[in-house]
Amino acid sequence: MRFGFDIDDTLINLREHAFHIYNKKLNQNVSLEIFRELKTLEIHEAFGLDKEQGSQMWNSLLEEVYFTDCPAFEGAIEFVNKLVQDGHEVFYITSRPAKYCPNTRDWVVQKGFPVVNSHFYCGMQDHEKIKIIKELQLDYYFDDKPAVLETLSDVPTKVFVKDQSYNQHVNIPRVKSWVDFKF
């Protein structure tokens, strides 16, 4: 079988990692409870930043957010490795900016995820993921973003949403925990 995975906030806890960095950089102590209630993908409002300030903050911290000690979700590394051990193909499809693709691939490998270079797709816009997913003829695809998931309603691929506070309105099967996930 062919499995596709988004990386950020699907396999790794990027938003929460960024949230901690924002607290530190802005010398604030916004609680994780507030983070877990956010109904948007963006985290800037929790820190009193408007959209422009939030965008500037995010862009100024991208390398720190992407390539420091962001944790994988519990069980994610083991889940993906088990798929490969069982003979399945794993593809990564991330919309991180193209200039970060080589470092992202290396970082994912360093974290312990199994990566075949030809199965690593990076640098596209979210809406372009659908083309790649169709071309790869994936059996399963996992992502967190409603904007991506909503473009997959007409594909034969079985789609799962990684449960997040901002995607509760998406009505497709959920992955709440990689440790407990079963097909």
Image: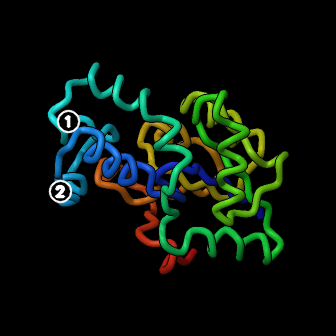
If the image is split into quadrants, where does the N terminus sit? bottom right
Q: Is residue 45 above or below residue 183?
A: above
Secondary structure at badge 2 equals loop
Q: How is the image coloured?
A: rainbow
Q: Is residue 129 above or below residue 69?
A: above
Q: Earlier in the sequence, mark 2 or mark 1?
A: 2
Residue for point 68% across, 36% down: 101
Q: Is 120 placed left or right of 140 in the picture?
A: right
Residue for point 62% across, 69% down: 77
Report crowding for label 2: few under 14, some 14 to 19, many 20 or more residues within 10 A (C-alpha). few
Q: Residue type at mark 2: give it.
A: Ser
Q: Is residue 169 visible?
A: no
Query: Is 133 or 125 nearer to us in this picture?
Result: 125
Q: Position of residue 122 (x, y in %)?
A: 68, 37
Q: Position of residue 4 (x, y in %)?
A: 67, 53
Q: Which residue is mark 2?
A: 31
Query: Is 112 or 11 nearer to us in this picture?
Result: 112
If the image is split into quadrants, where does the C terminus sit? bottom right
